[in-house]
Amino acid sequence: MPELPEVETIVRDLNRKAVGLKITDAWTDWPRTIKTHTLDKFKREVKGRKILRAHRRAKYIMMDLSGDKTLIIHQKISGHLLYGKWKVSGKKVEPAMEGPIKSDPYNRFIRFILYLSNGYMLGLSDVRRFGKVFLGDTDKIENINEIGKLGPEPLDPKFMLAKFKELMCRKRGVIKKVLMDPFVIVGIGNIYSDEILWYSGVHPLRRVEKLTDKELALIYKNIKFVLKKAIGAKGDSQQDYRTLEGKFGTYQNMQKAYQLTGEKCQKHDGGIIKRIVINARSAHFCSVHQR
Ligand SMILES: [Zn+2]
């Protein structure tokens, strides 16, 4: 599932590619993707509106449109937004350009398209069809879905160590699960919680109420470090995620713990990466330095 670095990468590319263009039409073969409108009503609402800016809240992609509307896309489990050209006939979508949009099978599950005024399109490739689209008034975004109830943004400069400690003090339970709770802190999922805990030397099953001040400070520092490093790598493409142009991110080549079961720890401490299951989600950690 795309996490903060993957969504942030898409948003930065949207600002480069799509801002300033008008939406000329919309299409979907899966109308329930659009949560706030029927397809016909949605088309009428978005046609002719200009994309003013793209931004992100948690894992929601937000595009402010002219006329004080905001279009929101949540890619959910397997979705990723692409910028390209497709030929649509009825429910059939074929790539109309060469390159990864056509050649990478993960980019071939287009369920939703926004047509742009320069002839390009934004297409949501989503094999499992859980991706969602919302359209609402810009000043009422907080009312859409769960957005108003989400926790703070970890990369916000105002998100200080004191705030992180305060949030952790209010919680009980295993640290891996707490880090992945979007109502505590947003944007951290299975990949980056494993990575943050590896860098911090903290075992994923440790209880948050038993962590020392020093450990909390390390986790706080590594949240920012790992997420920034992953944004620099344009995200992790081990699974479905691709960039807006359909290319691979590169964080999968930098992983320290996630999905490395059985491999030697990169700290050369004699440890082996082990996998355990916590609430049906896997956790990967070094058997030696994560305590
Ligand atoms: Zn180790």
Image: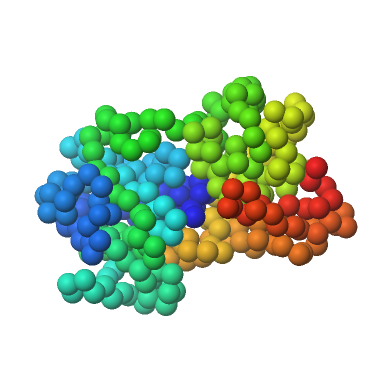
Please tell me which residue is depicted at 20% across the width and 53% down the height of the picture.
23
Q: Is residue 230 visible?
A: no
> Looking at the image, is 58 positioned above or below residue 283?
above
Please tell me which residue is depicted at 77% across the width and 64% down the height of the picture.
263
> Closer to the camera, 170 or 105?
170
Instruction: Classify residue 111 by image quadrant.
Output: bottom left
- Image quarter (top left, top right, bottom left or bottom right) of the C terminus: top right
Tally of marks: 0
What colour-coding does the image apply?
A: rainbow
Residue 105, horizontal then vertical, whole percent: 43, 74
Would residue 125 appear left or right of 281 to someone viewing this image? left
Residue 184, horizontal then vertical, whole percent: 53, 32
Please tell me which residue is depicted at 63% across the width and 30% down the height of the picture.
172
Instruction: Classify residue 84 by image quadrant.
Output: bottom left
Residue 162, horizontal then vertical, whole percent: 63, 22
Residue 231, horizontal then vertical, whole percent: 55, 50
